[in-house]
Image (spheres, rainbow, N blue to C red):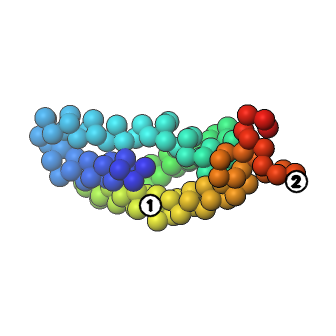
Amino acid sequence: MFIAFVLEGAAIFLLSAYGQNPVLFVVLSAFVFFAWGEIYSLFPATNADTFGEKYATTNAGLLYTAKGTAALLVPLSSILSEGGEWHVVFYLAAVMAILAGVLAVVGLKPMRQREIARSEGLTGARGGVRRAGGLVSAGEA
């Protein structure tokens, strides 16, 4: 996730600076849209890995509503772009994408490590399930 978010932030920043060049516009737009696609692949997988499979579809649906909720910020971008200058909007989007990448490493990674350690404690080192009588292998459970 860090790579995708930072790539997106860098591409948005560069798009703002060099978007008037037709070739760079196409190339940088491709990078931006490539990184935007992560919401469909990385988010549901990370969600299920982090919070478990029991409510994975419900949680993924709630995560996906963030995309619609973000549409409420469109009026803010209109205010920021008054006078025909969109650079502020692009810079703000780039900073937010890079911040999300940093948060993926600083916040999400430790959370995932704690969850992995907790789940290994519940299942044992070999992937079995702990029961009162001892460890049962995954095949027997």
Q: Is residue 135 left or right of residue 45?
A: right
Judging depth in this view, the residue of 86 and 114 nearest the camera is 114
* Secondary element at tag 1: helix
Q: Position of residue 1 (x, y in %)?
A: 43, 49
The structure residue drawn at horizontal position 51% and vertical position 49%, both measured from the top left corner, is 70
Quarter of the picture containing the C terminus is top right
The residue tagged 1 is: 105
The structure residue drawn at horizontal position 23% and vertical position 41%, both measured from the top left corner, is 28
Q: Is residue 123 left or right of residue 67?
A: right
Q: Which mark is residue 132?
A: 2
Q: In this picture, is 75 found above or below 138?
A: below
Q: Residues within 10 Å of mark 1 (few under 14, many from 20)?
A: few
Judging depth in this view, the residue of 25 and 51 nearest the camera is 51
Q: Which mark is residue 129?
A: none
The structure residue drawn at horizontal position 35% and vertical position 50%, both measured from the top left corner, is 3
User: What is the three-letter code of the residue carrying label 2?
Assistant: Ala
* Secondary element at tag 2: loop
Q: CA distance from mark 1 to mark 2?
A: 37 Å
User: What is the three-letter code of the residue carrying label 1?
Assistant: Val
Q: In this picture, is 130 found above or below 22?
A: below
Nearer-N-terminus badge (1/2): 1
In the picture, residue 119 is in which quadrant?
bottom right
Q: Position of residue 124 (x, y in %)?
A: 70, 52
